[in-house]
């Protein structure tokens, strides 16, 4: 006991060696540290107690430096910035572990002097914004067990000196710009290697003999996007690996079927996505790989139905079988509480989506059934999926009402896509309880009734913060969100665009088009300041565009066409400086088309046509100014008055003539002496005329 107390006192008395403390202070000076992570690094304290620093309990030498600042979302969240890895680290000769990952070194090079840190066992330079070639001097680190230089901009060939790293267990060079070959010499003495990650490089290929037997037994291999590595076939040397737990061979142009030699492996992860693999899923896969947790077979040429043996995989958590030719019904035994992701999109599955067998999908985070032929009501198996973030049922035959439990129970939902189905009834107002929702796509259904008015409950759409990328993507399978090959369709700006899930995080969209909705556009829609796309076209909406629509400052696409909207076009639309698409055609709008601000840039008449009472550019119907219009109206009125006066004069003349004529005739008839005098007068006039004509 006395010895134990002495040891504790001795540990507490360990002080940093001055020369090493000075080296660490020099390292601190080389960083821009906006988050003050290195605040504890000051010369008045013991460096062995500084954050991220550990010392040997006996010799007091600095042995561990951990400055990892892993932040996924954006560069601005990174903690430490520097123009290069400072040479002060060279003074720390006894370093065993060095982790500088997820910091920013301004695309500088890995220094040659790293090869002189002979005691290093752990070196992590992942995602450090490094460039240039890997120095061959790293091959001198004979004690190195872990080397990670992934996710940088490193170029050139991988040094063959890596073959001298006799104790290396983990090698990760993925996500760089390496070219050339990996040869047998790179692995000649790596008998301890159990994790090899070489994928996502440019033209990096594995050039080994067909009968090569590696000196190692891998537990994990990731060769994704390793161009030409295996010449479109599963490599023969892979059959010698009997301890595989994770096998990731995505996007390497394999064109055969799934090999039988995988039988008996202890695989927990199998990723063969984005290849040209043919044939069915092995019928006995549940017995071949009983420990399987992650199965990724998307984007291949596989066919057939799902084997019943999949139900034997009790730990299955992440399943992506999308974009194949798979068909048939889905068995309920596949749906367990262990499932976090299920993607069956772009296949030919049919029938009702099943209930689970005594379980539920309580841990599901992403469900994608897009472009199949599922039918029936909304999958009730999702009723208790409280952490569900993404659901896409587009392009099926689902019908019935949208259940109220969607808004009541799925509080974590960010993306709800029920597009192109047969849903009917009204839009439940409690959908607006989904505060994290940023994409609501109910287009191409048979929905009726009005648009809910409590839209201000959509916190993200209101512009109050953004959702974070799914935990699945951040820590387990980044390719699900960041891989450019994994796409989600979003209809906006009159076109269908493909987004990765990470890109979709920047999209905020409401699409209720092609339904039978009636009533007014809720004025609350103007409060959605984060909204980028709004499509209410092809409905039966009436009333006016809300006057305050200009408050939705983020709008880039607004489509209200093919409705029965009326009134004038609000001038506040001119305040939407980001607006790129505007469709107001086929309505009953009236008055002038505003030409203020950004609205003056919409010169396509199709944006406004088929509004019979609308006028002004860019329509051919020109508006007449009201003040100018009054003068012709008065002038025309005077002309009308003159016309009537002339007709009245003509009538009076004709009336006077008629009265005079018929008055004389009546007198001549009634008085004989007047009649004789009249005819005598006529005869005299006639004689005078004849005499005058004869004289001439």
Image: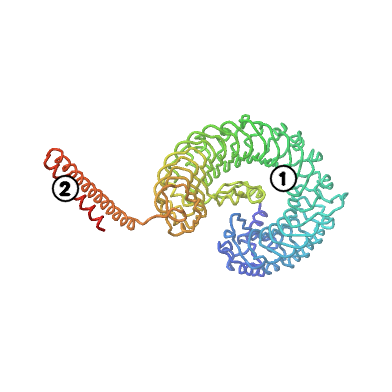
Q: Position of residue 147 (x, y in %)?
A: 73, 57
Q: Can you tell which quarter of the image residue 119 is in? A: bottom right
Q: Nearer the viewer, residue 679 or 168?
A: 679
- Whether residue 557 is situated above or below residue 359 in the rendered picture: below
Q: Position of residue 321 (x, y in %)?
A: 69, 40
Asked where in the image residue 350 lies, by quadrant, the reply is top right
Give the image quarter of residue 178: bottom right
Q: Position of residue 489 (x, y in %)?
A: 60, 46
Quadrant of the frame with the C terminus:
bottom left
Please report the residue visible at 36 percent of the width from the left and 57 percent of the height from the top.
625
Of the two numbered discs 2 and 1 in the rendering, the one whose residue sits closer to the viewer: 2
Q: Secondary structure at mark 1?
A: loop
Labels 2 and 1 touching (C-beta < 8 A):
no
**Secondary-structure class at tag 2:** helix
Between the residue at mark 2 and the residue at mark 1, the CA separation in whole angstroms equals 126 Å
Q: Is residue 419 above or below residue 556?
A: above
Name the residue nearer the viewer: 400 or 456: 400
**Viewer-side residue, 85 vs 357:** 357
Q: Residue 462: horizontal and vertical position, in percent?
A: 47, 50
Q: Which residue is mark 1?
A: 273
Residue at mark 2: 681
As drawn, which residue projects farthest toward the right?
211
């Amino acid at each position: 006991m006395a010895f134990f107390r002495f040891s504790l006192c001795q540990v507490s008395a360990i002080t940093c060696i001055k020369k090493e403390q000075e080296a660490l202070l020099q390292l601190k000076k080389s960083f821009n540290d906006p988050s003050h992570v290195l605040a504890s690094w000051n010369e008045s304290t013991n460096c062995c107690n500084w954050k991220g620093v550990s010392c040997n309990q006996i010799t007091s030498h600095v042995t561990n430096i951990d400055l990892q600042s892993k932040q996924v979302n954006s560069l601005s969240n990174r903690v430490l910035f520097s123009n290069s890895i400072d040479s002060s680290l060279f003074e720390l000769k006894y370093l065993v572990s060095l982790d500088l990952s997820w910091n920013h070194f301004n695309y500088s090079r890995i220094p040659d002097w790293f090869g002189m840190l002979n005691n290093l066992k752990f070196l992590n330079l992942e995602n450090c914004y490094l460039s240039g070639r890997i120095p061959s001097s790293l091959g001198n680190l004979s004690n190195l067990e872990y080397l990670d230089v992934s996710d940088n901009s490193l170029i050139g060939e991988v040094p063959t000196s890596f073959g001298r790293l006799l104790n290396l267990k983990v090698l990760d060079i993925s996500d760089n710009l390496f070219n050339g070959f990996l040869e047998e010499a790179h692995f000649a003495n790596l008998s301890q290697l159990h994790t090899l990650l070489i994928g996502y490089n440019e033209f990096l290929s594995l050039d080994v003999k067909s009968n090569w037997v590696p000196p190692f037994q891998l537990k994990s291999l990731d060769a994704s996007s390793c161009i030409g590595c295996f010449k479109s076939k599963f490599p023969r040397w892979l059959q010698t690996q009997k301890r595989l737990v994770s096998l990731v061979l995505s996007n390497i142009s394999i064109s055969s079927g799934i090999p039988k030699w995988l039988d008996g492996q202890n695989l927990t992860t199998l990723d063969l996505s984005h290849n040209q693999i043919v044939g069915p899923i092995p019928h006995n896969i549940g017995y071949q790989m009983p420990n399987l947790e992650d199965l990724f077979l998307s984007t291949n040429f596989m066919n057939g139905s799902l084997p019943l043996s999949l139900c034997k995989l009790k730990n299955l958590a992440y399943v992506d079988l999308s974009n194949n030719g798979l068909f048939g019904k889905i068995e309920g035994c596949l749906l367990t509480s262990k499932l976090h992701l299920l993607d069956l999109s772009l296949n030919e599955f049919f029938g009702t989506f099943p209930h689970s067998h005594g379980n539920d999908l309580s841990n599901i985070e992403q469900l994608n059934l897009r472009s199949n032929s599922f039918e029936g009501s909304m999958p009730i198996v999702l009723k208790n999926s409280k952490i569900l973030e993404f659901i896409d049922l587009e392009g099926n035959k689902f019908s019935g009402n949208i259940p109220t439990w969607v808004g009541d129970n799925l509080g974590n939902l960010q993306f709800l896509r029920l597009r192109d189905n047969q849903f009917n009834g009204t839009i439940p107002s409690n959908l607006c309880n989904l505060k994290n929702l940023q994409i609501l796509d109910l287009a191409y259904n048979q929905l009726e009734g009005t648009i809910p008015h409590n839209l201000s409950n959509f916190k993200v759409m209101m512009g109050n913060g953004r959702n974070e990328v799914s935990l699945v993507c951040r820590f387990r399978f980044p390719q699900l969100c960041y891989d450019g090959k994994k796409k989600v369709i979003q209809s906006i700006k009159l076109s269908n665009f493909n987004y990765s899930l990470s890109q979709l995080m920047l999209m905020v969209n409401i699409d209720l088009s092609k339904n039978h909705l009636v009533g007014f556009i809720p004025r609350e829609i103007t409060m959605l300041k984060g909204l980028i796309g709004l499509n209410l076209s092809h409905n039966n909406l009436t009333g006016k565009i809300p006057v305050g629509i200009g408050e939705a400052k983020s709008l880039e696409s607004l489509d209200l066409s093919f409705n029965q909207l009326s009134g004038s076009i609000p001038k506040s639309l001119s305040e939407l400086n980001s607006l790129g698409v505007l469709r107001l055609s086929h309505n009953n709008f009236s008055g002038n088309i505003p030409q203020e601000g950004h609205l003056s840039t919409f010169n396509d008449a199709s944006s406004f046509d088929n509004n019979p009472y609308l006028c002004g550019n860019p329509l051919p119907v020109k508006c007449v100014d009201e003040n100018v219009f009054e003068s012709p109206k008065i002038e025309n009125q005077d002309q009308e008055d003159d016309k009537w006066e002339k007709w009245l004069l003509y009538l009076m003349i004709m009336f006077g003539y008629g009265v005079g004529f018929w008055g004389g005739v009546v007198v001549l008839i009634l008085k004989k002496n007047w009649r004789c005098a009249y005819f005598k007068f006529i005869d005299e006039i006639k004689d005078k005329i004849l005499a005058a004509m004869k004289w001439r």
